[in-house]
Image (cartoon, rainbow, N blue to C red):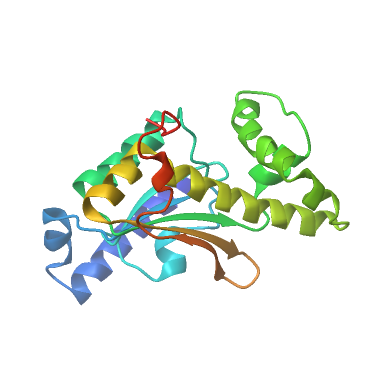
């Protein structure tokens, strides 16, 4: 059996099991989407949002990219953020990175071939900003882990500066912003940063707000 055919068979088995346990499951799911959370995570296949948080389809609105970045010229991410905040009215936005992130490792290793190099430059900029701290960490694995943490915190701060978040904070006092790091070796999420509505008020009337 080809690998993709197995996925189709597993899908049928999963759907059948759902209907057996709850005959109205898919009808309810198809009628409404009211997630409380937006998850901005890494594309890494080992970090599935629903599974590691124990949530069901419909509970988390998800965007994923390499190294879970929030970049001011990423129209895809900003469109997802706007839809989640302005239309779905999510109460929490979570940026979730993970230790052992291939994107972080690649960025720290220097230039790489292809389109991805420009994307990874965003991480190198963070590495440069924290050069002294990172240089003081002798063990490479620990240094990369710290860069993973710093990256998550930086992306949460980037979120806070967007006009989308600032507008929601000003008008509706939501959402809360969270930065988490997932550890592959034990499956535990670690909280790195939590910003409440009203943070970064100094950005309200400044051009620095990301559009």
The image quadrant that residue 20 belongs to is bottom left
Number of numbered discs visible in the structure rendering: 0
Residue at the far top in the pictured view: 114
Residue 15 at x, y = what percent? Answer: 26, 62
User: Compared with residue 39, is residue 73 higher up or lower down, i.e. above or below?
Assistant: above
Question: Quick one: 158 or 15, which is closer to the camera?
Answer: 158
**Residue positioned most to the bottom:** 21
Pick the quarter of the image with the C terminus. top left
The answer to whether residue 28 is left or right of residue 183 is left
Give residue 128's position: percent from left, percent from top: 73, 38
As rendered, which of 182 and 23 lies closer to the eye?
182
In the image: residue 81, left or right of residue 134: left
Determine whether, in the image, residue 44 is placed left or right of residue 162.
right
Residue 163 placement: quadrant: top left
Residue 149 visible? The answer is yes
The residue depicted at 29 percent of the width and 56 percent of the height is: 174
Q: Residue at x 19, y 55 (%)?
A: 33
Q: Position of residue 169 (x, y in %)?
A: 30, 51
Q: Left or right: where does residue 143 sit relative to residue 79?
A: right
Residue at (62% x, 73% y) in the render: 186
- Dividing the picture into quadrants, the one containing residue 131 is top right
> Can residue 2 be seen from the camera position used here?
no
Q: Is the residue 43 above or below the residue 114 in the image?
A: below
């Amino acid at each position: 059996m080809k690998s993709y055919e197995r996925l189709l068979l597993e899908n049928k088995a999963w759907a059948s099991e759902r209907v057996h346990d709850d005959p109205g499951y898919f009808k309810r799911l198809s009628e409404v989407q009211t997630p409380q959370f937006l998850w901005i995570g890494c594309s890494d296949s080992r970090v599935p949002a629903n599974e590691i948080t124990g949530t069901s389809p419909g509970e988390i609105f998800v965007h994923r990219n390499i190294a879970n970045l929030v970049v001011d010229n990423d129209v895809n991410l900003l469109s997802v953020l706007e839809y989640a905040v302005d239309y779905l009215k999510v109460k929490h936005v979570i940026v979730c990175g993970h230790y052992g992130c291939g994107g972080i490792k690649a960025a720290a290793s220097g230039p790489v071939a292809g389109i991805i190099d420009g994307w990874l430059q965003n991480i190198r900029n963070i590495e440069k900003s924290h050069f002294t701290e990172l240089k003081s960490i002798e063990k490479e694995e620990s240094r990369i882990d710290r860069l993973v943490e710093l990256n998550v915190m930086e992306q949460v701060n980037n979120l806070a500066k967007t006009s989308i978040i600032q507008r929601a904070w000003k008008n509706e006092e939501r959402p809360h912003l969270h930065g988490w790091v997932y550890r592959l070796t034990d499956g535990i999420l670690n909280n790195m940063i939590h910003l409440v509505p009203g943070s970064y008020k100094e950005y309200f009337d400044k051009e620095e707000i990301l559009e």
